[in-house]
Image (cartoon, helix red, strand yellow):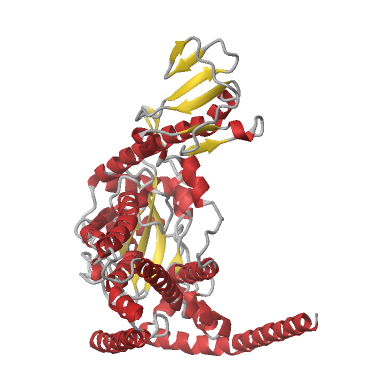
Amino acid sequence: MKQILCILVCSVCLCSCQRFGDFMTEITQSKTRDKETEKFESETGMLTKLKHVYNEFSVTDDAENLLSNSGLGASPYEVGGTCLNHTKILINATLSGEKWAQRMLDSLGKPSSDLLDLHLRWLGSYEECIAVQAVVNDDQGPSNPFNGKYCLAYFPLGGAQSASSLQPSGLSLAIGMCFPDSCSTADTAALAYTLASSLPLNTTVPYPYVQCQEKDLEYSDKAIAVIVVCSIFLAIIVIATIYDLVIQILLPYISQNYNVEPSNDMYGTFNAKYTNGHIHASNGHARNGDVISDKTPLNRNYEHTVTTKDYDEDSGVKYKPGLPGKLLLSFSAYTNASKILNTDQASGILTSVNGIRFISMTWVVLGHSYAFGLGVIDNIYTFLPSVLKRFSFQVISNATVAVDTFFVLSGLLVAYLTLREMKKKNGAKKFNWGMFYFHRFWRLTPPYMLFLMLYVPTIRYWTMGPLWPQTPGFEVDECRDSWWKNILYINNLVEPKTMCMAWSWYLANDMQFYILSPLMLVPLYYSKIWGSVTCLVLVLLNFITTGVISKHNNLSSNMILG
């Protein structure tokens, strides 16, 4: 009890020190922010210009001047005819006070507070924009010429960008805009540039990079093919599960009146006999005079044995499916789920590895939540410098080490299982090294490639939102020229900048370590000394290689701090 109280007291003291440190950090934070803001303002002058627009410019009052026909015609970039006509309808409806047009303007991104701390992501209202339906009344009655289309325009700050640029470079001002859905991405970029150029900024406005969200994104041929293939797999899983449930649950109820014994048929048929002695069946054909005693034992070499509480456990149905049945049962969700969720541990298993794996997975998820979130949050300029000063945030800023724990676990299990198997085979020469590599490849590659097939063509259809990359998606050209590197596990070595599924570098790295593992395992099996020397030499080569590569490519020692 005293030890527990001491631990609690120490924990409270540590938390108090942490909070006090955060309090002192907040006191000095404002001074640091002011210096950084003054530096940015002296270099670009952009904050003063944005504040001037926010205070003195009104979109509603000057809508006619900014979005007039002459203003649109002055754009140096061509706008499609349909888009231009619908934009004019939007202008006229705005000036007439139409409700739907006011909603399109209301959904635009607007300057928020804390501009001096570079809150430069003005998303606006995505839901309000895509819900707009334009209504035009003419001689033929009301019509719906277009709907709202949400686009996010990135205006680079501190540097120019041409109309051919595909991505924003450096610090950018992101503004959510609502256009007619008849406008293409090029049309919206030209309109956004024309609108921004009309603002009283007294500076050259860079050409924006625009990313639009389609409300009803048309499925590609690849996505349709993937959906068809996955539907076939789903149908097989449903059929296999029903077949499995019939064997595991329905047959036990039938066994209350029948003694069931399988035959040698490849499809897994069975012999049955009614217990009252009147009807006797063999492979579905009735015959008389063949009575089986209640004490007749059943064959115990069956694959599936299921009992229920409604009948004697010794009278359970035991059914041995044939080859087609076994292939079908491999897709059963019922049987596979029971295996996956089974927590029984066989003898000789390193159970402590499970706890380490859970902690490592939690650490990786925590680190990636911050890593991906930092790319989209609005207050990164103030948030990141603040949290980096906290001692507790070292868990996040150094979360890359969490991946190393998986390499440690993988190496531990490979060494443990391989050395144990070599001991059973009385040496490395009798060890089946062909199966050693084939089993690894065959265990990982089919589900790996299945997920790649599902993920790459369909990820952009999974959801939608202002920041969801519908076009071109998360992967470069949908991995058209790079997928084969993944199947060979060389995607981290050959043109890694165009890697398909960037997170798959770990699988490639782990496979490469696995291929090289016999260089350490074989010496370790025959001699602890020479095995240890071999491992130390490889570790030393790793240190030297890492230093040379980092020096040659000017790589930083820390992904966040540099």
- Horizontal side, residue 22 vs residue 554: left or right: right
Q: Position of residue 5 (x, y in %)?
A: 78, 82
Apparent side of residue 358 relative to residue 159 in the rendered image (left or right): right
x, y percent for residue 24 = 63, 89
Q: Is residue 53 visible?
A: yes
Nearest to the observer: residue 307 or residue 123: 307
* Picture quarter with the N terminus: bottom right
Q: Is residue 67 above or below residue 502?
A: above
Q: Tell me the quarter of the image containing the C terminus.
A: bottom left
Residue drawn where x is 31% and y is 54% of the image: 452
Q: Residue 164's quadrant in the figure?
A: bottom left
Report which quarter residue 523 is drawn in: bottom left
Percent across and percent down for residue 392 are 57, 81
**Residue 200 seen anywhere in this rendered image of the structure:** no
Q: Which is nearer the eye, 335 or 137?
A: 335
Up-down relation of residue 507 to residue 86 (above or below): below
> Along the line of sight, which residue is nearer the eye, 529 or 95?
529
Q: What residue is rendered at 31% in x and 58% in y?
A: 439
Give the percent coordinates (x, y) of residue 469. Answer: 36, 57
Give me the residue at 36% from left, 88% from top: 529
Total of numbered circles in the picture? 0
Which of the 4 image quadrants contains residue 432? bottom left
